[in-house]
Amino acid sequence: MAPACFSDECAIAASAERLWKVILDVPAMTKVCAGLVDAVEIEGDGGLGTIHTLKLNPAADSGSVHKSRWIACDNASHVLKSEVLEAQSKMGKFKSHSLESKLEATDTGSCVVKLKVECELEDGSSLSPEQEKTIAGGYFGMLKMIEAYLVAHPAEYI
């Protein structure tokens, strides 16, 4: 079966520039997403090919690990593409899983994050619309934590 591909978007009450700076500052996720991300490990120089491992809080997310590799990063258009190497999921085991996020300014203090997910379950089954919403919701939940941090700390990441 071919990989499933779906898109979704989420409004964020922070500028695209500020949000982009946080997204690229992966080591800061323990501070910015306190309570969700307990530790961060980085393999590489921070550029393309770098592997980021987020160790999630057991109380917040069953103690899972989210490991991904950056495969494309365009600072001018605020587009980041990553390949998920390891992640726990209630959907089953993924054969492949990639994510593309694009930040688009909506006005001076806000933006929209457009998310494109491509994934294939190892057993070849399809994702239901509810499963797609669960996957997108995980990414958007983290973005909402970053948004809350940026709103609470207006002098950071400017």
Image (tube, rainbow, N blue to C red):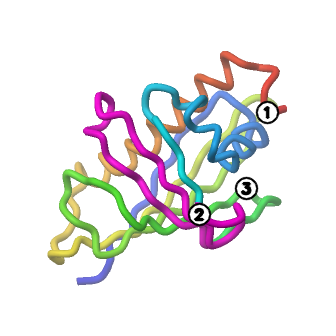
Name, please, the residue furthest toward the top.
152
Q: Confirm or deny contact between disc 3 and disc 1 (CB under 8 A).
A: no
Amino acid type at mark 3: His
Q: Is residue 125 magenta?
A: no
Is 2 situated above or below 102?
below
**Magenta stretch: residue 58 in it?**
yes
Distance between mark 3 and mark 1 Cα atoms:
15 Å
Q: Position of residue 106 (x, y in %)?
A: 72, 39
Mark 2 or 1 closer to N-term?
A: 2
Q: Secondary structure at mark 1?
A: loop
Q: Which residues are magenta?
A: 43-71
The residue where tag 1 is placed is 157
Look at discs 3 and 1 and give the one toward the viewer: 1
Q: In which quadrant will I find the N terminus? A: bottom left
Q: Residue at x 71, y 65 (%)?
A: 45
Where residue 148 appears, x then y in whole percent? Answer: 58, 23
Question: 10 Å neighbourhood of mark 1: few (<14), some, or many (≥20)?
Answer: few
29 vs 111, left or right, is left
Marks 2, 3: nearer the viewer:
2
Q: Are marks 2 and 1 in contact (CB under 8 Å)?
A: no
